[in-house]
Structure formats: C-alpha cells, structure tokens
Image (cartoon, rainbow, N blue to C red):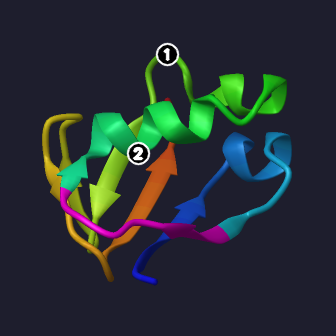
C-alpha cells in the first residue's frame, strides 16, 4: 500500500500522539483532504485546526496543493518572534 510520511513540528509535536507517522495514501488528494482525515482521528488532532502551515516535500503549500503517494508532508504553526 502507498503512503505519505507526515511530520509535526513545534507545539503540534508536543500536542499530538506522535511526532511523525506513515499514513495510507493510495491516490492523489489535497493537503486539505489529508488534514481532514487526520482531524477525524479524535480530540488530540484538533490541534490541526486553525492557522497551521504546511509543506509538501519541503515546499510551502496551501490546502489545495496535491499530495502524491510517497510525498513528505509537514505541519507546523506559524513562527512568531520579535
């Protein structure tokens, strides 16, 4: 079965049950589709709601970006600083 590798950074890494995972992904779909599947896993995954950034294969993307089997997807909160 095909999959994507998903990485979580910053507060997501601390909040979610795991810092990275392999997720079944047999056909192309959007980052938004992937995020919705993850969110459906339960309460802890609500951390993916709101202003969360995403990169596919280390390139920043929006929710409508296509994810292919074998891609690496990273989710992280916006960086703030002063």
Q: Residues within 10 Å of mark 1 (few under 14, many from 20)?
A: few
Q: Is residue 19 left or right of residue 30?
A: right
* Label 1 residue SS: loop
Above or below residue 24? Residue 70 is below
**Distance CA(mark 2)–CA(mark 1):** 15 Å
Judge left or right: residue 65 versus residue 3. left
In this rendered view, identify the residue nearer to me: 78 or 35.
Answer: 35
Question: Magenta span covers which residues?
Answer: 21-28
Q: Please say if 59 is above or below 78.
A: below
Instruction: Give the structural element (helix, strand or loop) at label 2.
Output: helix
- Residue 81: in sight, yes or no? no
Where residue 40 sits: x, y (%)?
63, 29
Kindly identify the residue that appears in the image at 68 percent across and 22 percent down.
Answer: 46
- Nearer the observer, 29 or 76: 29
Measured along the vertical axis of the image, is residue 1 above or below residue 61?
below
Residue of label 2: 34
Name the side, left or right, on which 17 lies relative to 62: right
Q: Magenta stretch: residue 42 in it? A: no
Residue that numbered label 1 is attached to: 50
Image location of residue 69, percent across then percent down: 29, 75
């Amino acid at each position: 079965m095909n999959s994507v590798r998903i990485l979580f950074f910053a507060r997501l890494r601390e909040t979610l049950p795991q810092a990275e995972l392999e997720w079944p992904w047999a056909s192309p779909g959007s980052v938004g589709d992937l995020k919705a599947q993850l969110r459906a896993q339960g309460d802890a995954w609500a951390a993916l709601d709101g202003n969360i950034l995403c990169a596919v294969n280390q390139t920043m993307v929006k929710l409508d970006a296509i994810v292919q089997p074998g891609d690496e997807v990273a989710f992280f909160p916006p960086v703030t600083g002063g």
